[in-house]
Amino acid sequence: MLNQEIKNKINQLWDLFWSGGMANPLTALEQISYLLFMKRAEDVGMIKDEKYKLSIYTSDEKYKDNLPNYMKEVFNYIKNLYSKQESFTEAMEGAEFRIEKTSLLNAAIDLINEIYVEADKEREKGQYFQDTLGDFYELILKQTSEAGKNGQFRVLSHLSE
């Protein structure tokens, strides 16, 4: 179960993408997932090459202005960590990192880092990270399905006649 602090941060993250121009909730969810994955990949030691560690780019001010381009490099590195025959590589084949706005990316990374801090606190209380992540996605998917997130759908009059 997510604590209220994590829920608030998830809502802030969702609103950030929405107001940052990612009106398609599935695209926003996809990009949030990529950021979460890149963070987690570094945390569990999946990324060995220092050049591609997310924390290098997010903690050093010299990268802040061109962060989207660096993040694309990190993302492409992660996509190709495994051989072409591996299911991970196949699943990531068409994946693209699409966050172009530096301000959106910086703010999103800050929020994700805050979410991870809260998740670590929950882990100290006995909550498994996988459960927290599952609850995170459950909340995001619930928000995606709520009225207003996907806009309004209607059939044009000349098509319905």
Image: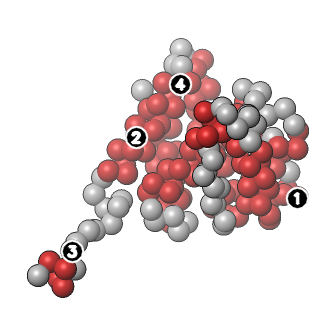
Q: Quadrant of the C terminus?
A: bottom left
Q: Quadrant of the N terminus?
A: top left
Distance from Cα at disc 2 to Cα at disc 3:
30 Å
The residue shown at (77%, 61%) is 69
Percent of width and height locating residue 94: 60, 52
**Label 3 secondary element:** loop
51 horizontally vs 126: left or right: right
Q: Is residue 78 visible?
A: no
Q: Name the foreground residue: 14 vs 39.
A: 39
**Label 1 secondary element:** helix
**Badge 4: residue crowd in 10 Å (few <14, some 14–19, many ≥20):** few
Badge nearest the viewer, 3 or 4: 3
Percent of width and height locating residue 40: 67, 34
Dot 3 or dot 1: first in sequence order is 1
Where is 39 relative to 148, above or below? above
Residue wearing tag 4:
130
50 horizontally vs 130: left or right: right
**Badge 1: residue crowd in 10 Å (few <14, some 14–19, many ≥20):** few
Q: Which mark is residue 155?
A: 3
Residue wearing tag 2:
139
Question: Disc 2 marks which amino acid?
Answer: Leu
Distance from Cα at disc 3 to Cα at disc 4:
41 Å
Question: Disc 1 marks which amino acid?
Answer: Lys
